[in-house]
Amino acid sequence: MAIIINLDVMMAKRKKGLTELANEVDITLANLSILKNNKAKAVRFSTLEAICKALDCQPGDILEYRKEEE
């Protein structure tokens, strides 16, 4: 997939663990783990907004586009 989720990078920069962020965002640990491990197929804007608020970052800090090799 050409969209990369750099949630783990932002979490490390903000020194937030998975459980702490899951509680702040009000998302299950399993779903946050799916996002963190770049396994998600979609993300709701409300979830993205809550993550950005909790990590004090912009969506572009978490989401990245990389052109796929053909």
Image (cartoon, rainbow, N blue to C red):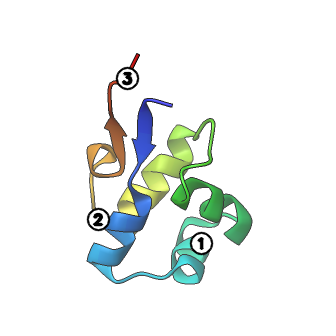
Above or below — where is 62 with respect to 10?
Answer: above
Helix, strand or loop under label 2: loop
| Disc 3 residue crowd, few under 14, some 14–19, many 20+, Cα 10 Å | few
Query: Which sits earlier in the primary sequence, circle 2 or circle 3?
Result: 2
Q: Nearer the viewer, residue 57 or 63?
A: 63
Q: CA distance from mark 2 to mark 3?
A: 32 Å
Q: Which x, y percent locates residue 30?
A: 72, 65
Query: Which sits earlier in the primary sequence, circle 1 or circle 3?
Result: 1
Name the front one of labels 2 and 3. Answer: 3
At 56% across and 58% down in the image, what residue appears?
A: 37
Mark 3 highlights which residue? 69
Mark 1 belongs to which amino acid?
Ala
Q: Which x, y percent locates residue 19?
A: 60, 81
Helix, strand or loop under label 3: loop
At 51% across and 31% down in the image, what residue appears?
A: 1
Name the front one of labels 1 and 3. Answer: 3
Mark 2 belongs to which amino acid?
Asp
Numbered badge on residue 56: 2
Mark 1 highlights which residue? 22
Q: Which x, y percent locates residue 66?
A: 32, 32
